[in-house]
Amino acid sequence: HVCFVYSSESVNGTNAGRKSLPEDKGLDVPADASSSKDKAPEPSLEDARYLEKRDAALALCRARQSPYTENITAKVIIPNKNLYPGYNPFAPIDKKKLKELADWLKTFIIEHLSIKNHVHVELGDDLPKCLLHIDVWINVLRKRYDANPQHFRSERMCFLDHLFAQQWRFNYKDFKDSELDQNGLGRRLPGGAWNYYAGTIPSFCQSNKVWGMDIDDVYAPVNYNDTHWIAMWISIPKRHIVVWDSICSSISLEELDVIMEPFLYMVPYLLVECASSDEQRAQYSLEPFTYERPTNIPPARAGDCGVYSLKYIEYHALGIEFSKKDFPKPNGKTMRDKMAVDIFQELPDAHEFENKDNDANLGAYKG
């Protein structure tokens, strides 16, 4: 079992992330018989569509018999004893494969792109290209995990793409502004939230594992203002989120509180609302999660934050402590090349992959 020891800049156990949401009184709010809320108003067409999509997703989730929880004692995390046999994240670049990738790129440019559009043999920094590469590398991890979960520190984890954080942050205001019902629920979750919960998205190497039941650890990249990448590890059993930021000066503590607030509130809410039984619901609480940003992790150079964020996720999922020896600042280019070669080898058609999960997310409130 690998223990990660962090020196943390901020743990929001008191003020940060503990802002009260309007009318957030928990699950045991009794219905007042004389209240005008006895007769709920008819939902609008938009709300009706939202509820229809939510109920359909949850019904599908609850109808499926999870193959991972036949024995309730299996919910205890049992770390894998044999870490990454045959999977060495420190392996040097295969120079032959790197040349093959360079040759393929030349052909691809000639056949599909203008000669003027030079493409580097690495993961790019400009946002549209970077979003693609971020998600492609997450797909590499999902594929590796799907094929060989024993290589990782636990068999109860999932890897999410950038759309998860993007959608949740964008829709957080709707969540905060929506009214609670008499049970302390009824808030409007982001589109596709139930699908993430049920493991039906991301659709690539679909896990079909349910958060809390089959999943304890959630990894996801987070983009800030289209200029900076961080990574987060959501621990459901610990009710805590760890943020890995390779350049802490890029985001102030106040800005980070705002970034993290949607996840601190909506993850516990999702677990409560989506619980398939009262017994399961009793295991959770609407109290917000806490979070921290360690300050003793290897830092990156400007422009390498995306690569470092992805590598933080990979190393932690494998149970490997972050080492400055493995994350020296001059190694950013080498990391990019190695990841590009791995993508080329393991997902040769990645450039043709179209992520349609976003369609489902954006369509949650539409017909």
Image (cartoon, helix red, strand yellow):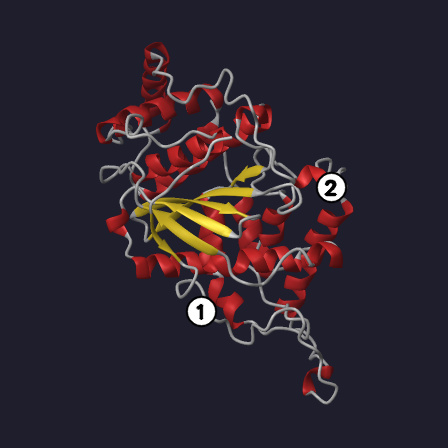
Marking on residue 1: none
Q: Position of residue 71 (x, y in %)?
A: 75, 38
Q: Nearer the viewer, residue 8 or 100?
A: 8
Is 217 situated left or right of 15 in this image? right
Q: What element does badge 1 sit on?
A: loop
Q: Is 36 located above or below residue 15 in the figure?
A: below
Count of numbered circles in the view: 2
Residue 111, visible in the rendered structure: no
Q: Mark 1 belongs to which amino acid? A: Lys
Tag 2: residue type? Ile
Q: Earlier in the sequence, mark 2 or mark 1?
A: 1
Quarter of image, res 102: top left
Q: Is residue 359 visible?
A: yes
Q: Which residue is mark 1?
A: 19
Residue 72 shows which numbered tag?
2
Residue at figure coordinates x 38%, y 17% from the top left: 91
Q: Secondary structure at mark 2?
A: helix
Tell me residue 39's x, y (percent): 73, 82
Crowd rating for badge 2 (residues with CA inside 10 Å; few <14, some 14–19, many 20+): few
Task: Identify the residue at image location x=68%, y=83%.
Answer: 37
In the picture shown, does residue 364 fall above or below 325? below
Q: Nearer the viewer, mark 2 or mark 1?
A: 2
